[in-house]
Amino acid sequence: MTGGPGWFGRSPYSHRLHFFAQAGSVGQGLTQADLATRLIMLAATYEQSAEQHRKEKDQNVIDTKKVFEDLKVRLGETFKITDEQHVNIRTLAKDVIYEKGRMSVSFMQNDIWPALLREQGALKFTNIFGIPVREKVLKKAIQKTASGVRSTFREDILASVSPGSAMSLSKFTYEMAMKYKRGGAGENLDRGFTLRNALLRKFVLENLKIAQTPEAADPENEDSDSTTSPPPQKRKHVAQNTKKSGGRIARGQDFWSLVDAFFTKLVKDWGRVLTAPSWKAYMDEVILEDNKRFDDQSNNSNDGTNSKLNKPVLCTHNASFPTS
């Protein structure tokens, strides 16, 4: 029995113990030793009962905590990205793919994650970071959205050099900036965007077959606001050496992997600074050829595009590819 000599006075059963002591003193009563022994045994019984009640109460608290923990796990398994968060992921993915110095597009999702982490407050992602099960859902959403944006941008580039939807390099650069770049084209769009677009259009013209082939690994197109791209095409036959067993395009042979390799080779040959003499001569040739081929497609149209952007753009710039 715990609590010391004063336990009787503090026990919730003290009134019963006092009654028992009084009952044991009626008439000749019990001897003091016998009465004390009986009181101690009764008090021990009461204390044991109280302890059992405390344990049951504590267990109920523990069980309740377990229920809440289980609910948290189950809610985590059914967690979904909100519509607003989907829009913000797509907005950021578009901005990333249209960066003027972007060399790698195939793994652009790796740059979306840290950007969301930095802007989690403004973009409404504070309820995700730091919770592994939700971060896993976010990662899948980023991958799917990035894939959809890649597919749409490929279709936009292809449409810009295809009969019936072809347009000048300057108009394409302006329209794509309005569609993909956060903040739109602005009044003074950096010429680096024009230079990169010229290289992308050149690559598409030289690789039309692969540009017309949807990537086998792409999930359903997430980006539904395309204005210049044609409707999604069914998979076309491609050369056997570009396919894996099961019909998927072999890794490294899909459109954006080849584009990445194209940019990597250019940078390896001439460096990252596009103002180098070798770059200037090459880019002037690429842009002049593009203007010669497509400039009359939209220069005479009244489409509201900034007229300054419809003029031929030579490589008088300070653009460069990133160092990492």
Image (cartoon, rainbow, N blue to C red):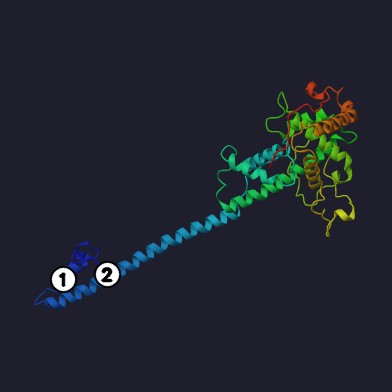
Label 2 Cα crowd, 10 Å radius (few <14 / some 14-19 / many 20+)? some
- Residue located farthest toward the left when viewing the structure as drawn: 28
Q: As shown in the figure, which amino acid type bears the numbered disc 1?
A: Ala
Task: Please tell me whether residue 271 is drawn above or below residue 129 in the rendered image.
Answer: above
Instruction: Give the numbered dot on residue 311.
Output: none
**Percent of width and height locating residue 126:** 55, 43
Label 1 Cα crowd, 10 Å radius (few <14 / some 14-19 / many 20+)? some
Q: As shown in the figure, which amino acid type bears the numbered disc 2?
A: Tyr
Residue where numbered disc 2 is placed: 46
**Percent of width and height locating residue 32:** 12, 76
Q: Quadrant of residue 296?
A: top right
Q: Quadrant of residue 262?
A: top right
Q: Quadrant of the N terminus?
A: bottom left
Task: Please tell me whether residue 31 is drawn above or below residue 229 in the rendered image.
Answer: below
**Percent of width and height locating residue 22:** 14, 70
The number of numbered discs placed on residues in the rendered structure image is 2
Taking the spot 68% from the left edge, 33% from the top edge, the residue there is 182
User: Is residue 61 among what the camera can see?
Assistant: yes
What secondary structure is found at the residue carrying circle 1? helix
Q: Quadrant of the C terminus?
A: top right
Residue where numbered disc 1 is placed: 21
